[in-house]
Amino acid sequence: MQQNKNKIAVKKLSCSYGKRVAVDNVDINITENEITAFIGPSGCGKSTVLRSLNRMNDTIPNTSVNGSITIHFKQDENPIDIYDSTVDVIALRRKVGMVFQRPNPFPMSIYENVTYGPKLYGVKDKKQLDEIVEQSLRYAVLWDEVKDKLHAVSAQDLSGGQQQRLCIARALAVGPEILLLDEPCSALDPIATVKIEDLLIELKKHLTIVIVTHNMQQASRISDRTALFWVNEQSKSGELVEFKPTVELFSNPQDPRTEGYITGRFG
């Protein structure tokens, strides 16, 4: 069995908002074609680290980032430092897609939602756009539910779970290699959550996935590796406490904070 390669290398990452250090000195390697879960109490920096992986933190005023994040994209011989001044951030976010906590479909048709990104990147051919829509919606396990109303229904009229799967389809439509998800199921009911989880397990055959979740059961069900973040009592900044294969972290945590968090005693 072939060993999956290292896809993302985070070294000595520190992120600050103004004078407040949100997360400090994080080292983490994320493996290709796996699901990596970030868990931990509110305010521990897990979403900050997630957003740093495609430079979404750049959109927040007074944000500073130190350390390095390198990603090994398929067409590149060597990993690239995504914070290098020569990096095209728009092109980066095409390869490293993101899905947010609450479904945020555009107020337009299902078809227009999915084709928004490809059109932005210059795809004009109607046949090619049709193929992208069908493939993306099939990947998101949504095609059979919406194929007869692609143009007739506003995406905002779909159920919450359908909207979130549409947002995943929209992210997939531009052909990313990495998908970041920030608590994608927190606003969904249990049935919709199961559909998203099943979808992510299927998608990791093609993508590298990083998910922030507050749901311990979700992390244990779907992730290959799990990282626990915590707030340092002295500095009040977030830090990485423990990172290992999920089964190992849940069955044999090394840090008392990990054990306390996954058993619900604190955090």
Image: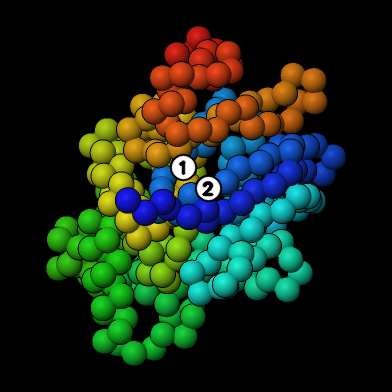
Work out which residue is located at the far front of the displayed protein and give it: 1
- Circle 1 is placed at which residue position? 36
Residue at 30% from the left image edge and 66% from the top image edge: 136
Residue at 39% from the left image edge and 88% from the top image edge: 124
The circle drawn on residue 30 is 2
Q: In x, y percent, where is residue 93?
A: 55, 65
Residue at 49% from the left image edge and 79% from the top image edge: 120
Relative horizontal placement of residue 267, taking residue 21 as reference (left or right): left
Q: In x, y percent, where is residue 43?
A: 64, 30
Q: Disc 2 on helix, strand or loop?
A: strand
Marked residue nearer the N-terminal end (2 or 1): 2
Work out which residue is located at the far top of the displayed protein and give it: 265
Q: Quadrant of the C terminus?
A: top right
Work out which residue is located at the far right of the displayed protein and give it: 19
| Foreground tag (2 vs 1) | 2
Q: Disc 1 on helix, strand or loop?
A: strand
Relative horizontal placement of residue 239, taking residue 33 as reference (left or right): right
Relative horizontal placement of residue 148, taking residue 117 as reference (left or right): left
Q: Amino acid at mark 1?
A: Thr
Q: Is residue 38 above or below residue 98?
A: above
